[in-house]
Amino acid sequence: MAKRKYRTFDEIEEDYFVKHPEEIDDYLTLCFEEYANDQCTPALLSSLRMIARVKGITATADAAGMSRKGLQKALSEEGNPRFESVNAIMHAMGYHLKPEKFDMAAGR
């Protein structure tokens, strides 16, 4: 009997965004909102890594002025990218970082 290969959640999520690129904007907005609340850098980098794969690692790296390996390293689980790198990656994917005022009294 042949052994079944099951897809990972990351593979399923990536496939979803390949088929529904119009939902990437809302997904990234949510990722940054969650990061603002919990400061979980690995989760944010994982999301950016997945979107970079959807948009094409090589194309994203080229547009960010990075090597493919440099992009993968910056967005890896052990990644600790500089602010400039995150900004360049976001620009390469067609986004920019912008501040959004929140209600300090409400804690958000």
Image (cartoon, rainbow, N blue to C red):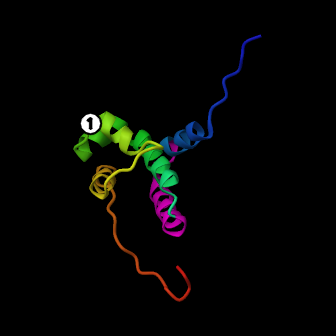
Q: Residue at x 33, y 54 (%)?
A: 86
Q: In which quarter of the image is the N terminus?
A: top right
Per the picture, the main secondary structure of the magenta-coloured stretch is: helix
Query: Which residue is at the front of the view, 70 or 59?
Result: 70
Identify the residue at the far left of this view: 65
Within the magenta stretch, is there residue 22?
A: yes
Dot 1 amino acid type: Ser
Q: Residue at x 49, y 85 (%)?
A: 103
The residue carrying mark 1 is 67
Identify the residue at the far bottom of this view: 105
Residue 53, horizontal then vertical, whole percent: 42, 39
Query: Which residue is at the front of the view, 74 or 15?
Result: 74
Question: Could you say whether the residue bearing mark 1 is in a helix, strand or loop?
Answer: loop
Q: Residue at x 54, y 82 (%)?
A: 107
Residue 78, horizontal then vertical, whole percent: 45, 44
Q: How crowded is mark 1: few (under 14 residues within 10 Å), some or many (20 or more)?
A: some
Q: The magenta stretch spans which residues? A: 19-38
Q: In this view, does 70 lie above or below 44?
A: above
Within the magenta stretch, is there residue 28?
A: yes
Residue 6, horizontal then vertical, whole percent: 67, 28
